[in-house]
Every structure is written in structure tokens, then in C-alpha cells.
Amino acid sequence: MDRIPIILDCDTGVDDAIAIMLINKIKKFDLKCITTVAGNVEVEKTTRNTLRVLQLIDAGVPVYKGADRPMFRKQITAEEVHGHDGLGGIDLPLSSYDVKNLPAWDAIYQEAVRCDGSLEIITIGPLTNLGMVFTKYCNFKNLIKRIVVMGGSATSGNVTPAAEFNIYADPEAADIVFNSGVPVFMCGLDVTNQAYYTAQELEKLGKIGNQPAKFFRDVLQGVLSYSLQFGCPGVSLHDPMTVLYAADDSIFETHHVWIRVETKGQLTIGKTVTDFSSDKKYPNNAYIVTNLQRDAFQEHVYTLMSEYS
Amino acid sequence: MKQIPVILDGDPGHDDAIAWVLANSSPKLKILACTSVCGNQTIEKTTYNALRIMALINLKVPFAMGRPRPLVGDPIVAPNVHGQTGLDGPKLPEPAIVPLSIGSVELIAKIIEESDEPVTIISTGPLTNVGAFLLLYPHLKPRIARISMMGGGISTGNWTPAAEFNILVDPEAADIVFRSGVPIIMSGLDVTLKALVFPEDFERIRTLKNPVAIVVAEWLDFFYNFHRKLGYAGAPVHDAVAVTALIHPEILSSKDLFVQVETTGDYCRGMTIADRLGVLGQRANAKVITGINRKAFVDVLIKAASNYGKDNNG
């Protein structure tokens, strides 16, 4: 089987950390590099966290540091969810700060050129880095196959009633991506909030017993209690689900729709406006993932995490 | 039976017309007045249509005409949905009454002031009249029992991907209404897209054979003809849900939510945003109707149309 060349763009972040552990074990993917961006915490921290997770799982994936702020706005962070350090206070060692000396957007572009149209990109943070690539390289849109985005929501937001964090953090970058002409597959809150783990289910996963599985369980505890406080049944694995969707969409429901990002509305900045059923029937430019089979999702996660020794 | 005193405010419009037919036939409602608003068509046309509907159903209550424009923006009309007259299709009787010399907002204030008990407003068009009333007569707020309105949608729009027509036409008025603190029953697209009347249902209404039923069936024919081309399985009789919410709440399901109206934005002007995950921690300001027993809804409409066969007044 030809492996799919892939780049993961992230703002690590507790559920980003898990996404990295999973993507490392997906055999179908040829993970070219990981790029980092400011989001859940500052980019310096998301970069260090990324390196920490890679060290934990002993994966030698190149890491490129990306944007330290949104394209046009001030940075917002989500420390109340991810903890001050971005990893919920879990202390993971970092023995060497091995970050490549090239901005993320140039690294992404160069990899796209090398892959000659077959590269896929998964973003699980704000879309600033991709916004920068599209802005710098006009032919980039012809060089990549698709973009799978964790972000947005067709129904309701989590930062505001209308907007999800990753899109709200850099709405202009997000709109550049949705308007790029490249097929965008949106894994928004509509589906990622279905990809949750209850406290019991997390315990079960931790019992796999290897270090990455224990880290999986421990790093989510803070977000879990935060989520339960808001009346959720468990902790939503937004980013890991998005990685698994990119690998295998068979347990998901996807619809071809029109999506653009509101960048001006007083109450709706960062909303991914989705044309499900308007009389206008705007031309489809994106795919929205709306449903998943939660059992099959957890099974897939369990299998991948069991591969660590 | 104790009746609910109501004011009918709308921009007829085929589904407004059916909503008024339904309201007028219900022994549970006491219609105190009707007002027109610009929306589906210009204010002249919706006013003429309102008066023709009132003549058809023999509804003789005070009537006043609304303003020719939304509170802030320019009018938007929907000839593609309702035709050039705003109520194309069957021939209707000419108006039996003339509008009062006062405007719609003044009439609403007068009726509410004079009523012994709080009045319910049934709004089936843009919220221009209701918003203006709240703005101009804030002291009468406690005299409004509730506003049962058709408009918005917390999951989708129709005129744009984000906005439903009635809210999009006058988002500033809708904003006033949702901030007002007056209890709101919101029948938006979440429910009204499920409030479908199928072609076989039209025939059940037509065979009632009374003059009102025949007109209702022909309105449905016209209204469905537009929606069929968009892929609808039936005619969504949006506005009738706002009346049903008062007379047959048992066939509807709802959620109490905090709803706001977006008045700006490239894509979201006129959108109703519900805080479903509770990120703002605000108290609910609207009962958002989300579900309907479609068959029971059709039966309610058929019963209403059949009432017109019994006497003159429904």
C-alpha cells in the first residue's frame, strides 16, 4: 500500500498530544513533519510540548515552529482548558530542543512541492500556518490533495455561542483556507463532541499499561473535570478524532456543503457558516463531518495505543 | 373556556394567511386586532392581502397598516416564494374594512393598553412592528403575555445559510425583541422545516369543499410549487406553527435557550444564535420549538379548515 504523505499542524495542547501519539502509529500515513502554531498556549510552549510528546513515544519526526500569533488579531489562548503549560500540568521530560530552522509555512510548502500533489494536511490548531502558506505561495492550492481541519461548528460554538476555539482564534486564516479551492474536510464540534471518553473509558484505556497509554489517561484528567462541570458526558477528543477521520472515514458520516467563515459579525466572529438547507444553495466547497460511531472510534484508538510497548 | 387574547401581526404571504385562518378558527384564541408589516411583499401589498384574508374568513377586528420599511435596513421582498402580489393563487374577496388612520404600532399599544389582561402577540413576519412597539412603549412590556413568533433558526437559515427571512429583513427589530425580557416562543426553521403539509394533505383540505378550505388548498398548491423545486417533500407552513404553539403545544417539543440576534457580519446578519453549550451562562430568553408531530399538525389544519363549513365565522 502506498502510504499517504501527511503533515500534522498543531498547537499542543492535551488532545493534540494524543493526536500525535495516534498518528505515529497509523501505518497508512507517512508523517513528513509536524508544524506548530500558537493556540491553546503560546507557540514556544506548543512547540516544546510537541517535542516532549515525540520524545515520550520515541518518534523522530521533524518539527517546524510556526506562527506565534494570528494573522491579523491578538492571540487568545485556552489555558483554562489545557493548563498553564498546555499539558494539564503533566511533567514530560524534554532532553533536546530539536526544532528545524525553517518557518512552518515554508516547510509545508516545500513538502507539498516534493510530494507533487499527493500531500494531505491535518490541522488541529488555529489555521494561521496554512493562512500564511496560501498568502505566500499562490500555487500552493494546486499542490495539496486535501486539508482535514479540526475546527468550527455548524451548530454551536464553545468559545462563544457561535464559534469554536480554533476558528475563533484566527478567523481570517480559517476563511483563507475554506476559500482556497482546496477540498476542506471539517471535523467540527458537531462530530467531535460525539468523540468523548467517560472517566471509566479513560481508565480502561490507561490499563493498557504502557507509558503513552498512561499519559493518555493522565493528561486528560484536567479537561475531563472541566468538561463534566459543563454537563458533558465525558472529555471530547477533538484532535485525535480528526486524525482518525483522515485515516479512515468509514465510521463517520460526511456531507458535501458550502462553508465560509464569518470574520466581522459582532456575535458571530469565527463561525463556520454552513449551507445545509438554505434556499440559496451556495456552491459546495467543503465537507462537513456530522456523525461517528463512538464504539468503533474507541476501538480504533485502543488498537493504536496498544501498539506502544 | 378562557380565551387567549391575541394580536395577529404578519406580512401575508401564503403561510401567514394559513396561520390567520388557523387562529381565527380556534375557540382558544380571541383576536383583538390585526396589523401588517412589510416582508414577503411591500407594505401596500401585504396590507391588501391581510384585508382580503380578513374578508375571506369574516374577521372584523381593528386593523392598522405597518411602516413601509424595516427599522434600519432596506426592505427585502420574496416574490419568488409568494408571487408578485405576495399572495398569488386563488381569487380572494375584496377587503371588507379599511385600515384605521393610526399606524400599526399605535394600534398595538392601544389594544394592549385597553385590554383587561396581558395580550399575546403572534408575529409571523419581520419583527418591525413588535420591535418598534417595544422601543416606543417600554412601559407596556408587562402587559404583553408573550410573543409567539415565526422566525430564525438555531441550526440553519433559509434566505442565507445563516439567516431566516423574517429575521434577516429586520435584524435590529428582532434584536430588540430578544433582548426585551418578554417571554418569547420561537418557531424557527428548526421546527418549521418539519411542519410539512404533503400534496395528499392538500386534497384532504380541498375535499372539505367550504370556500375557505378550497382557498387554503389552492394557497398550498401555489406555495408547494415553489418549494418542490427546492426539493421539499411538502409545503412548510412556517407561520402556522407560531399559532399552533399557543393552541396545540402538546404536538410540539421545545428547548429553553438564550438566543441572540446577529445584526452585523458578512455572512451572519440576521442569524439567531442559541447558546446551546451554555458558554455565556445566561438565563434562557426563549422557548425554542424544535420538534413537531407532523401528522397531528396536518390534522390541526384540517380541523381548522373544516370549521369554516359550519358557520360564517369559523
Image: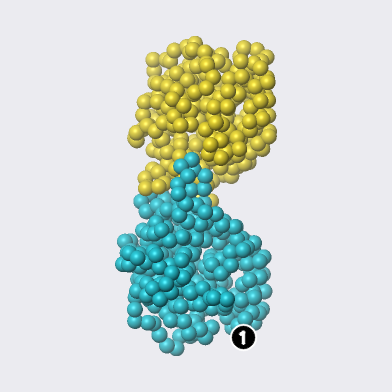
Chain colours: A cyan, B yellow
Q: Residue at x 62, y 85 (%)?
A: A309
Q: Residue at x 34, y 81 (%)?
A: A101
Near-viewer residue (A23 or A13):
A23
Residue picked out by circle 1:
A309
Image: B160 above or below B18: below
Given the image, what chain letter belongs to the residue carrying mark 1? A
Q: Is residue A16 above or below residue B195?
A: below
Tell whether A300 sits left or right of B136: right
Res A109 visible: yes
Q: Position of residue B211 (x, y in %)?
A: 61, 15
Residue shown at 59% from the left, 57% from the top: A253
The crowd level at tag 1 (other Cα within 10 Å; few <14, some 14-19, many 20+) is few
Secondary element at image label 1: loop
Count of marks placed on residues? 1
Identify which residue, A277 or B312, lies in the foreground: A277
- Vertical relation: B226 (above or below) A211: above
